[in-house]
Image (tube, coloured by chain):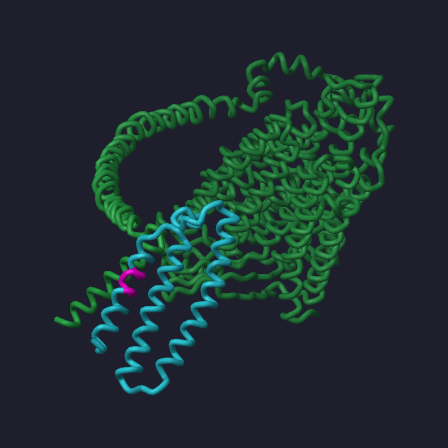
Chain colours: A green, B cyan
Amino acid sequence: MISGNIITDFSLLILFLPLIAFIINIIFGKRLPRQGDWVSIGAILITLILSLSLLMNMLMNWDSDFSHEVVISWIDLGAFKVNLGFWVDNITVVMLVVVSLISSMTHIFSLEYMKGDIRYNRYYAYLGLFTFSMNGIVLANNVMSLYIFWELVGVSSYLLIGHWFEKHSAADASKKAFLTNRVGDIGFFIGIMIMFTAIGSFNFQDLFKGVSEGLVTGSLLTFAGLGLFMGAVGKSSQFPLHIWLPDAMEGPTPVSALMHAATMVAAGVYLTVRLFPLFSPEALTIIAYVGGFTALFAATIAITQNDIKKVLAYSTVSQLGYMILAVGVGNYVAAFFHLLTHAMFKACLFYGSGSVIHSMHHSLHELKDHDTDPQDMRNMGGFKSKMPITHWTMLIATLAISGVPLFSGFLSKDAILAGTLAFAQNYPQHFLLPIFGFGAAAITAFYMFRLIFMTFYGKPKIEKVFKGIHESPKAMTFPLVLLAGLSFFIFYTLPYFNPFSDHGWFTELIKARNSAVPGNPSAEEIYQGVHHAHYTAMALSLLVAALGIGLSYLMYIKEKFSAEAWAKKMGFLYKLSLNKYFFDENYNRFLYQPFLKLSRLVAYIDWDLYDKYFINGFGHVTKFLSKITGRIDYEGLDQTLVDGVGRTTQVFGEKLKQVQTGRLQNYMLFALIGVILILVFQAA
Amino acid sequence: MDSLTNYLLVSSILFSLGLYGVVTRRNGVAVLMSIELILNAANINFLAFARFGGMNMTGHIFALFVIVLAAAEAAVALAIIINIFNNFDTINIDDVSELKQ
């Protein structure tokens, strides 16, 4: 059992160690031995140990109401007070472990993956910055500092996506990610400000209290909630702001695993989980629909993608949609559960894809082949024998994400689907939500196995490339094995061993809080509904998973149906999915282009009209006035008055100079005349 | 005939002549000579006042001092003039204006 003070110290260390590593690496990184990667790895491993000790402490305490808050005054202007601080409860602890664990794995994985990179030290520095900001989000006890770290996370994401900024696509992707997030963050900030004006505090607890006392009600509360949710939409890449995440795959693969699969994109879900008590029923309904729709919609895109990372990216969008859906139906503990399990298996999948890409890259490099895409699954196949560790770990993670029993994903996905089903049973008008959920589950199973089958099974597509494929080094397989291990159910259900029930330390320690909004169903009611729907949901989810896996098996292993023939048959739908429903194109046509036109118009008004005539006119008038005053000053004052004094002196000097002849006899004469004059005056 | 006025008259004539010479002469030696005249005018005054003023020997002693000083002065001044001549090839004091602006 750790005392409060030590928890405070641990939290501060967890927060600031990665920042220190960042500062050291960004300044001295180039000069340090091994470019300073050991600084970052040391810092992150200490962070991991501290987080794990907090987790141990949590498990030893076994207190679902554990809460530790530290508040420091930041701005105090009498009426306007802002406090900073952090709030450690069970959710925080679990999230800290997730962040520091995945971050450590990324640090280790990158040792090999990024070996020889031109900006190696900067890469590690940015990883530190990211970990710092992400831990900041997790530890925040108020929306203001959460928002600050939120933006810092956005910055580090921007920096890491654009790590290879020589590539135009990477530079564009980083900008796209940043700007798309900006759209969501505006909403987030509006939400924060509505809450602040109404309640007068940024602190979570104060906000919950304010809402439960009815300081914000009705549509204002819904708006504030949707504003806050917009932040999550941006960061967690939900429809309609999902467009940045697949492009973000331009970044290094370990970064994709850390930020764009496991932690940063989960920040949006974490936010909605944290602020769940603030959402009004209307807001929650919208959240549920956005999440459910995203889950299904992204899954349908993932079916047709051929780039291994793109499949995983859309799968991430889809899984995040699941979590958001769970928050929307009130079952936010399930959302957080899925966040936890998803972080493990999705990071594993990304490391696996990184391992495959790394190997492909080497093989292609040796063949001096620069045209074949190392990420395209159509160039792979049959890698199972060459990369056994990568294959088995990815297979385990795939089983987890598909919702197969014995794996973690089954438990969390089942909890979400049960919550959704219960919600639809209570409110039959929302029958679409479970359809979204189960549909997405089936499709997920299908495309994930498609990925596995296309990559690891079947015949090698390019024999030459296949020859060069080999298993990745230990620094890369270690994270894979660890995370694949963590995809088993056992780690989430301890101390119980029932693979069909999520009952365990997680459900015991992470207890749902009642919504602060009067009239929302209480946590107990939601739990009852979920419990009721549990077995139906389980049966259905097993059915859809089996359906998806079976279909994938028939199509890609047995080749009973030809994928190409189906694609042709469904021509229009296939194209729609392959081109991601033309979102980028339509955004371009209907948003960016008109916006560009508007900007050009404004620029024209500003530059050609306002600047040229008004501002320059001002300039001309000033110039004219200056000329007049200049003339008065120069010709009047300077030339006559000032120079006049000089000239007078000069004239007198010239005249008086003549008295000084330099002849002794003249002086004598003057002296004589002087004496005579004195005598004459004396006499008179 | 034997009155103070006459002596003073002679001495003032001598003084005026000396002064005139100092102011007008261009020749360095002539200027020196004119200074001698002025000194002698002063000597006459001393002696005259000593004779008629009842001042015992004071005047005489003064006159002797003046003569000694005049001799010394003449020696120094002539040495200067010889040097001027060596350097400038002239003893015209108007031409000796090296330091003039």
Q: Residue furthest front?
A: B1
Judge left or right: residue A273 versus residue A107.
left
In the image, A458 versus A197, the foreground residue is A197
Which residues are the magenta region? B14-19
Q: Residue at x 56, y 65 (%)?
A: A69
Please, is residue A233 above or below residue A532 in the view? above
Please, is residue A6 above or below residue A486 in the view? below
In the image, A673 versus A300, the foreground residue is A673
Q: Residue at x 38, y 62 (%)?
A: A80
In the image, A289 versus A166, the foreground residue is A166
Is residue A211 within the magenta segment?
no
How far across and down, in percent of the image, does residue A278 sit?
Answer: 45, 53
How far across and down, in percent of the image, does residue A217 sit?
Answer: 36, 53
Is residue B16 within the magenta segment?
yes
How far across and down, in percent of the image, does residue B62 sit?
Answer: 38, 78
Q: Residue at x 57, y 35 (%)?
A: A295
Q: Residue at x 53, y 53 (%)?
A: A274
- Locate the N terminus of chain B by quadrant: bottom left
Judge left or right: residue A670 versus residue A93.
left
